[in-house]
Amino acid sequence: MSQTIALSHDIHRDDEGSKIGMWLFIFTELLLFAGLFIVYGVYRYLNPVAFHLAAEELSVTVGTVNTIILLGSSACMAMASSAIRMRNKGMTMLMLATTLFIAFMFLVNKYFEWEGKFHHGLFPGSEDLLKLGQGDTLFYGLYFFMTGLHALHIIVGFILITIVSVRVNNNTLTADNPVLLDNAGLYWHLVDLIWIFLFPLFYLIA
Amino acid sequence: MSNHISETTTHVSFREEKGRYKGIFAWIFSTDHKRIGLLYLYAIVTFFLVGVSLGAAMKLELIAPGKTIMNPEAYNAIFTLHGVIMIFLVVVPGLPAVFGNFFLPIMIGAKDVAFPKLNLLSWWVYMVGAVIALSALFMGGGPPDTGWTFYAPYSFKTNTNMLPAVIGAFVLGFSSILTGINFIVTIHRLRAPGMTWFRLPLFPWTLYGTAWIQILATPIVGITLLMIVGERLFHIGFFDPALGGDPILYQHLFWIYSHPAVYIMILPAMGAISEIIPTFANKSIFGYKAIVISTLAIAFVGYFVWGHHMFTSGMSGTALYTFSFLTFLVAIPSAIKVFNWVGTLHKASIQLEPPFFWAASFLFVFMIGGLSGLALGALATNVHLHDTAFVVAHFHFIVFGGVGFAFMGAIHYWFPKIWGRMYNTKVATRGWIMFFIGFTTLYLPMFFLGIDGMPRRYYDYVDRFHGPNIISTIGSWVMIAGLIIILVNLIRGAKKGPKATKNPWGGKTLEWEVDSPPTLENFEEIPVIKRSPYDYR
């Protein structure tokens, strides 16, 4: 232990430390959403019937498809981490590109889903939603806020993976220093994990 | 004074080191933890002076009943800005960002923090957050007037510039989180060989506890502030009773962060005091492990007491009793620390120097602040004292008296190390006396006003409160006079003071073994630690 510490002083690089830092950051992200989960829990408890009916309006099919493709992208990201260690640049690039493509597909899906809701007047501040009552207002408020914040995380992850891809492509990120790729992967799995919570909360518990 | 004589070496201090950039860019793009610490110091002191001016304006308004110098709207805006600036820009970053950045790596025997670039980013995020928050002053609609707590539903009903203030606070939270992550990883990974956990000095220990609170609590206020933003922009209805939301829920979410934030402020202050007292007592700290464990206990129990801000907001009886009980519980580890500091001073040969005066007066004001906190933590008295001047006096004794005095003590203690020069200790002592007298004259009368029923946040009061308010306002002038003396003395010392030796106070922690000011890399060779940090006698 003390030897690795001494080593990290000399070369100014500490992969283990970077990983710890990333895990701590992921922890804060989970807590960020935890605040919303509390709000969701409180309002679901107060408006059980309205939340039940509102949840039935969401398409389980679209939600399931999005869950599957997001899980797929996480698998690709994990394979990219392995591929870079095997010094297989082509495979790493392919896996990163697939991840990016799938992330993009997720956002396209989300766009159409949101557009449908807007079309039916189910968005915060709309007149139609106010007519439905307070439970529905809160449900859709939470739905847009939480999936919106999640989509924002997808975009951040998208940018992060793009940066990683550029660095893999120009050989500044290789098997000798894969920690940036690993950390981007950890972030991507976090985004995936949050969706795994959002999916049942909004689509399945109906 | 110690016998160490300043060595004339060829070492270049971090202040003179030539980097990639020149002039001001050599500072604002520097990843050296010491320069970043000083960047924070200059920013924080600037914001502090703005906050002090606002506070002085409030006290001036309160010197007589009725309108004195400002109308009620201006008063609302000023107490809000005073709170936002002092809490989010000054005391929350406060000691960790300034002295933590500067001294944490040196005290654990490292050359820098774990993520130097992230450290610089934290400072930039802090500055961006500060600019966003302060831009609320200059845009149409007028400065925010909700109080620093941004309570719902007023925070989304008022027509003033809430958005910049709330978004600014959100961004500042990010800076706080990044600093926290950096410090935790630094303490875990970069301790010098031989520095076991129980050989870690107490200031790093408190930074460690603080960093955990920063990581665990700040995201909650982040999301809460985002919800306020959503509420204002999209009328989502989370906290709007008209749409089914619950304003009390906002208070819960807000205080889940903002009570632990009080410990973000006070823990590093306690750490600094735990460094100053053994040095000036020339004696090893009494009950090192008790201080460490009580630090962690405060960080832990501090999470579960947020409800005591809401005793009159509407909670179940069980919740009231539980929060009140836990509030009493969290006082115990703080009391243990006070006991340890006093125990350290027992039968010690004390050097009477300015840092020690600040530390000793810290004990005094911290005890008053802490014990008055118990009066507020008890359910029956709380109902009487809630939202009165008593509360204002209590938290100024803790936050300004506690954190402010510790900050002053820390800057007088580490001054020779940071600037390599010494200030005039006689003038510093005079400044401290004036500041201390002014401080107590300013805030003590507010306890009595509060018990008598004077509410906080009012620009006006009935005639029978006149006397104590005059005393309090005069106290604010004395305190500011003391502050000016202190600042002028320190600035003069930094520029023209006599050269300081390596170890002018006879401290035993690692920062006293490096040059004053330290070199860029702090240590020629990473030291090997073979003793406790306080082996005086």
Image (spheres, coloured by chain):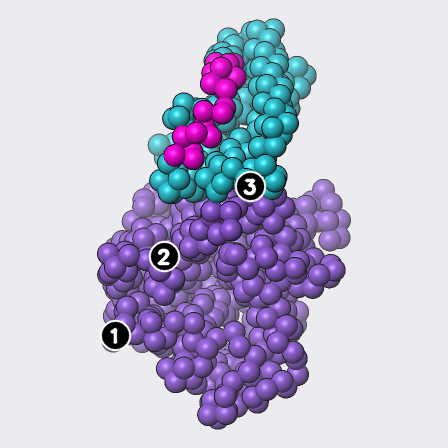
Residue B306's tag is: 2
Report in which chain the residue with disc 2 lies: B
**Pointers 3 and 2 within a single chain:** no
Q: Nearer the viewer, residue B294 or B506?
A: B294
Q: Which residue, given by chain and number where applicable, does mark 1 sit on?
A: B346
Query: Split into 4 quadrants, where in the image is the C terminus of chain A?
Result: top left
Helix, strand or loop for disc 1 = loop
Using the image, determine if residue B447 lies above or below residue B312. Answer: below
Q: How crowded is the residue under tag 3: few (<14 C-alpha within 10 Å), some, or many (20+)?
A: some
C-alpha separation, residue under disc 3 versus residue under disc 2: 33 Å
At 51% from the left and 47% from the top, the residue drawn is: B243
Q: Main secondary structure of the magenta part?
A: helix
Image location (x, y in percent) of residue B524 = 51, 45
Image location (x, y in percent) of residue B313 = 38, 62
Which portion, as a residue range, is magenta? A49-70
- Check residue A55 for magenta coloring: yes
Report in which chain the residue with disc 1 lies: B
Chain B, colour shown: purple
Helix, strand or loop for disc 2 = helix
Residue A130's tag is: 3
At 63% from the left and 72% from the top, the residue drawn is: B73
Q: How crowded is the residue under tag 2: few (<14 C-alpha within 10 Å), some, or many (20+)?
A: many
- Chain that is cyan in the image: A
